[in-house]
Image (cartoon, rainbow, N blue to C red):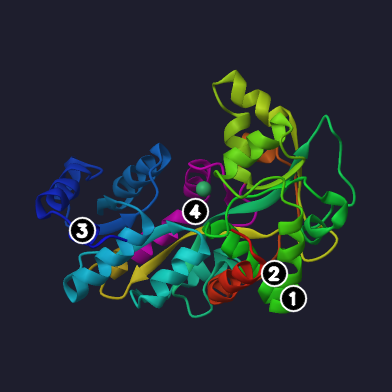
């Protein structure tokens, strides 16, 4: 993060705070407000804010930026920070916020009851609100490359020159590796990583969508990507995107073992929150069924609350058993995961 990005122009903040209020008619309300720092930017999120304000009278002031920038902004604002809630994606980023000391425990019976234990930080510092799975895709026309049923198989010498995956600096890969470290220890994780590196079809490059496209084109036989990128391609208005989606097949890894690795979009209550009560009310609202649908659909994710149906594009990806490793383990093992990647020579 460059120093310049830490210093937010005051006028810009003011403009954001006043222009992004979700409902000007609520100005007369005495229900108070909520200052939301979010790295999400979906139309469905705007509907969520509007619905919440209509139901409670609580006005939402929104600041949107990248997760790391928001964490640093809250840190630099210190005790005077207006931030109440930080919403971001990936347990690794929630862990960075936790390490920065900007969260306080959330105390809510409703959240504890609605959200499964593995979707909540053990001390309540953050909660998961939707989830994504990190899956294997392969080229449908070329057929299932065997053996291939779990992440472990990506290291099998049978797959020399077939595997595409993005770089080790990517947080989705770091969190996947953190789950492997947590489940199996660093030695097993490193052996796996070395095997995968030996199977690379190309030097790690591009994003998750780029991996899917490379499988569709036949440049690679096998790749790893998050589910929402597949749902997004399948539901695209562009026929070329839909052709890419239909040229690949999804495989949910680990169905015979720990389940498929999942990660979360989540939120933490800022330790200096001036409107903590309103923030908890908003989190509780986000776990209601209609809000879960809107929140998850914004990015083609799975709702975090059990029993809430995913969008049709997400349901079409298929059913799977997820790894119920607590999402906090993905944070705790971030640095070990990065060292494993380094030792294995995973660029
Ligand atoms: Fe993403």
Point out the residue furthest to the left here.
11
Tag 4–tag 2 contact (CB < 8 Å): no
- Indicate left or right for 40 with 7 as reference: right
Residue identified by numbered label 2: 180
Circle 4 packing at 10 Å, graded few (<14), some (14-19), many (20+), is some
Q: Measuring 65% from the left and 69% from the top, which residue is drawn there?
A: 179
**Along the line of sight, the residue nearer the viewer: 61 or 159:** 159
Vertical relation: 245 (above or below) 119? above
User: Mark 2 and mark 3: span between their CA atoms?
Assistant: 36 Å
- Residue lying at the far top of the rendered structure: 239
Quadrant location, the C terminus: bottom right
Give the mark nearer the N terminus: 3 vs 1. Answer: 3
Q: Which mark is residue 184?
A: 1
Residue sitting nearer the eye, 165 or 290: 165
Q: Is mark 1 within 8 Å of ligand 1?
A: no
Question: Label 3: few (<14), some or many (≥20) within 10 Å?
Answer: few
Along the line of sight, the residue nearer the viewer: 140 or 61: 140
The answer to which of marks 2 and 3 sits earlier in the sequence is 3
How far apart are the alpha carbons under marks 3 and 1? 41 Å
Residue indicated by mark 4: 288
Q: Which residue is mark 3?
A: 4
Q: Nearer the viewer, residue 247 or 104?
A: 247
Q: Is residue 136 left or right of residue 208?
A: right
| Among numbered discs 1 and 4, the one appearing first in the sequence | 1
- Point out the stretch of residues depicted in magenta: 279-308
């Amino acid at each position: 993060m460059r120093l310049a990005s830490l210093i937010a122009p005051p006028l810009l903040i003011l403009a954001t705070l006043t222009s992004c209020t979700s409902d000007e008619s609520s100005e007369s309300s005495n229900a108070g407000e909520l200052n939301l720092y979010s790295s999400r930017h979906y139309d469905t999120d705007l509907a969520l804010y509007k619905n919440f304000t209509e139901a409670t009278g609580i006005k939402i002031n929104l600041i949107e930026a990248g997760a790391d920038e928001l964490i640093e902004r809250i840190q630099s604002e210190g005790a005077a920070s207006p931030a109440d809630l930080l919403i971001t994606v990936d347990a690794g980023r929630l862990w960075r916020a936790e390490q920065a000391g900007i969260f306080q425990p959330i105390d809510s019976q409703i959240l504890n009851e609605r959200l499964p234990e593995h979707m909540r930080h053990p001390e309540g510092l953050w909660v998961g609100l939707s989830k994504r799975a990190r899956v294997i895709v392969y080229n449908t026309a070329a057929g299932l490359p065997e053996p291939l049923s779990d992440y472990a198989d990506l290291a099998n010498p049978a797959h020399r020159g077939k595997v595409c995956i993005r770089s080790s600096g990517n947080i989705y890969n770091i969190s996947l590796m953190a789950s492997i470290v947590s489940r199996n220890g660093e030695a097993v994780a490193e052996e796996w990583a070395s095997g995968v590196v030996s199977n690379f079809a190309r030097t790690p490059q591009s994003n998750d969508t780029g991996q899917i496209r490379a499988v569709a084109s036949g440049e690679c036989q096998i790749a790893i990507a998050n589910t929402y990128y597949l749902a997004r391609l399948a539901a695209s208005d562009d026929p070329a995107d839909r052709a890419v989606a239909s040229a690949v097949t999804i495989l949910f890894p680990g169905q015979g073992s720990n389940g498929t690795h999942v990660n979360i979009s989540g939120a933490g209550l800022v330790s200096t929150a001036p409107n903590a009560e309103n923030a908890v009310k908003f989190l509780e609202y986000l776990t209601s069924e209609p809000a879960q649908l809107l929140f998850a659909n914004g990015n083609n994710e799975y709702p975090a609350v059990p029993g809430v149906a995913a969008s049709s594009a997400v349901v079409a990806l298929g059913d799977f058993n997820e790894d119920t490793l607590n999402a906090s383990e993905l944070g705790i093992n971030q640095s070990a995961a990065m060292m494993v990647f380094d030792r294995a020579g995973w660029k």
